[in-house]
């Protein structure tokens, strides 16, 4: 594992939680949602609760709920735009089947402490982070260092991630690129790599797509609006919301 010097600049770097150079945020969330859905469907209890840790704008939570998985959102720094009212209220009181951490590990100033915090939430962590190339690039030779924003401060090799897994008594699986899993479950490393392939994951998602939570989430949102705004507003949203989308007036 490689870390920067004491990151005294983080206060400035997190003036905005999502950096302006993160132009891949949308495509990353879409791709990761396909891959996660395939892995969760095969290896985990797809009817359980899940948590997206450091969930950013909430886009990934929205995508996973639309795919039928009961996902919730948690982030200490970022505003929640797409998963409002889906915040994890009692983070440590509920044990989640699995937590996802998309592009989080490279942001950790104290990886062991913060990963330990994650393991208090779930014994299964599906996460993405780019592995250090074997050539051990110098600053300026690898885009993932991200010096333009200063938020990436911890970088990992497969060996360092295996050491972390061993410390916490879990198994470690990787696609040897950017997608990894810490898990109490014993699964086939080959199947993990196969199913996490983006092209296969899209195909599997089409075959196994669960019942979307979009409609029930919409109903809950309307009810909250009704409760907070009064019955008149609630009736207006109910009469002209989902029904209008289905062609009704």
Image: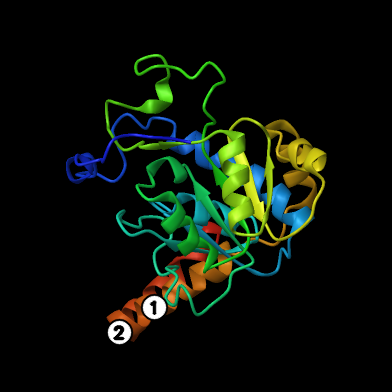
Residue drawn at point x = 27 percent, y = 26 percent: 148
Q: Quadrant of residue 89?
A: bottom left
The residue tagged 2 is 230
Residue drawn at point x = 28 percent, y = 35 percent: 5
Label 1 SS: helix
The colour style of the image is rainbow
Q: In this view, does 229 lie above or below 74?
A: below
Query: Which mark identifies residue 103?
Result: none
Quick one: label 2, few (<14), some, or many (20+) residues within 10 Å? few
* Structural distance between the alpha carbons of marks 1 and 2: 10 Å
The mark nearer the N terminus, 1 or 2, is: 1
Q: Is residue 31 visible?
A: no
Pick whichever, 94 or 23, lies toward us. Answer: 94
Across and down, in percent, residue 217 comes to 52, 68
Residue drawn at point x = 46 percent, y = 63 percent: 117
Pick whichever, 229 or 65, lies toward us. Answer: 65
Quick one: label 1, few (<14), some, or many (20+) residues within 10 Å? some
The residue tagged 1 is 224
Q: How many labels does the image show?
A: 2
Of discs 1 and 2, which sits in the foreground? 1
Q: Can residue 27 be seen in this view?
A: yes
Q: In this view, does 7 lie above or below 73?
A: above
Residue drawn at point x = 35 percent, y = 58 percent: 80
In the image, taking residue 81 as reference, residue 208 lies left or right, namely right
Label 2 SS: loop
Pick whichever, 231 or 36, lies toward us. Answer: 36
Across and down, in percent, residue 208 comes to 78, 52
In the image, taking residue 92 as reference, residue 236 lies left or right, namely left
Q: Is residue 248 above or below residue 137?
A: below
Q: In this view, does 12 lie above or below 142?
A: below
């Amino acid at each position: 594992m490689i870390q920067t010097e004491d990151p005294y600049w983080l206060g400035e770097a997190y003036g905005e939680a999502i950096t302006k150079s993160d132009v891949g945020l949308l495509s990353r969330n879409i791709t990761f949602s396909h891959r996660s859905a395939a892995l969760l469907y095969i290896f985990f209890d797809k009817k359980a609760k899940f948590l997206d840790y450091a969930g950013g704008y909430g886009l990934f939570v929205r995508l996973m709920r639309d795919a039928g998985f009961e996902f919730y959102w948690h982030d200490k720094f970022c505003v929640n735009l797409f998963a409002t009212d889906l915040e994890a209220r009692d983070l440590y009181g509920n044990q989640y089947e699995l937590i996802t951490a998309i592009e989080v590990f490279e942001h950790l100033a104290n990886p062991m402490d913060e990963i330990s915090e994650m393991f208090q939430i779930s014994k299964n962590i599906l996460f993405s982070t780019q592995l250090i190339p074997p050539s051990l690039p110098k600053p300026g030779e690898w885009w993932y260092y991200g010096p333009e924003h200063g938020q990436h401060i911890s970088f990992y090799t497969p060996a360092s991630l295996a050491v972390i897994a061993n410390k916490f008594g879990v198994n470690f699986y990787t696609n040897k690129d950017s997608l990894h899993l810490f898990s109490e479950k014993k699964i086939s490393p080959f199947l993990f790599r196969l199913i996490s392939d983006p092209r296969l994951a899209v195909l599997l998602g089409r075959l196994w797509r669960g019942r979307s939570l979009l409609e029930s989430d919409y109903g809950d949102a309307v009810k909250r609006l009704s409760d907070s705004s009064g019955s008149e507003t609630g009736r207006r949203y109910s009469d002209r919301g989902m029904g209008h989308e289905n062609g009704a007036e």
